[in-house]
Amino acid sequence: MFIMHNTINLKHVWTKNIFTYHIVMEPLKAEELVNRALFGVDDQENRQRFIMHFGEEVRQFEATIASIYIQWREFEQNYSGNLDADIVIVTVFLILARLVHAMKLLMTGHVTLAGVARRMVIEAIALAILFSKHGMPYLNEYKEDKFSVNKAIGKIIKHHKKLNINKKALEKMEAIRDSYNKLSHATITSMIDIIDKDGIYLGPQFNENNLSIFNNEISSCLSLSNFLTDIVSGITSNMREWPCYYRKD
């Protein structure tokens, strides 16, 4: 049984004056600017500044993800070895991996790419739920490349009673996914990590001028990580209903 809470806080607060900036005249040659951005020369400094403000939140995230990883390992050991089960297992792992990637990107100032990674997390959650429910056609459609991943959340909303999931929670999850569309395309919002009132940057920056944005984004990572314990438990419960030949026990 799934227990989905309506307390996921993924609200975005974006500056409306993103184009109010001045060009920073860097005392660097073009080649050096590209090299610094390409090899992440400023990443360590960005992480250190991030930790100064959000160190406790990062530690909470790390502890939660470690706990869920142990939960996933137990799940994997009980069901791996069959193609259908392996797809579910890897999809759940994708959720974990992309959420870790989102936090890593956020810590180095990649706000936009972190949002894109979290969008993938939400879609993977929907996929894992659908695939784990034995008797539904979507896993086979996925294997045959006939299932549109973008429709996964709509499908679990449609079948929320059969899946025993709160419809309002699912609709909120869908709205959150849709909010990240602004980061997946070349919108003004997607420029938030390269432009601010102090300048325009080739590489990502952790800028204290955008603390409210970083605060909202790390809150979304924490909310999703706390949410995953219930998700993995619900998926495990669904798979207990699979025929016994899928299980190792």
Image (cartoon, rainbow, N blue to C red):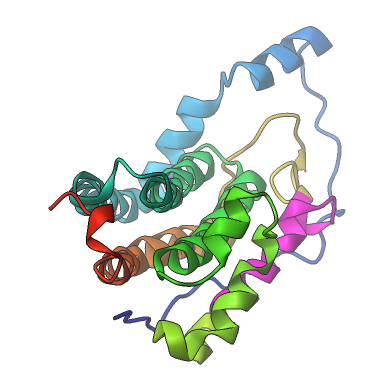
The residue positioned 22% from the left and 60% from the top of the image is 244
Q: Quadrant of the N terminus?
A: bottom left
Residue 245 higher or lower than 51, as above or below: below
Identify whether 59 is placed above or below 236: above
Q: Position of residue 239 (x, y in %)?
A: 30, 65
Image x and y of residue 218, in percent: 46, 58
Q: Residue at x 45, y 46 (%)?
A: 94
**Is the stretch drawn in magenta largely helix, strand or loop?**
helix
Whether residue 119 appears in this view of the structure is no
- How many numbered marks, from 0 up? 0
**The stretch drawn in magenta includes residue 189:** yes
Q: Where, by quadrant of the figure, is residue 81 drawn?
A: top left
Using the image as rendered, state which of residue 230 and residue 42 is in the foreground.
230
Name the residue: 45% across, 72% down: 135
Residue 120 spot, x, y in % from top left? 58, 54
Q: Which residue is at a point 52% across and 37% down the rendered structure image?
A: 108
Say which quarter of the image contains residue 22.
top right
Asked if residue 40 can be seen in this view, the reply is yes
Nearest to the observer: residue 181 or residue 208: 181
Horizontal relation, residue 180 to residue 191: left or right: left
Q: Which residues are magenta?
A: 173-190
Instruction: Tell me, yes or no, whether the highlighted magenta stretch contains residue 109.
Output: no
Whether residue 35 sits left or right of residue 173 in the image: it is right
Q: Nearer the viewer, residue 54 or 10?
A: 10
Outermost left residue: 249
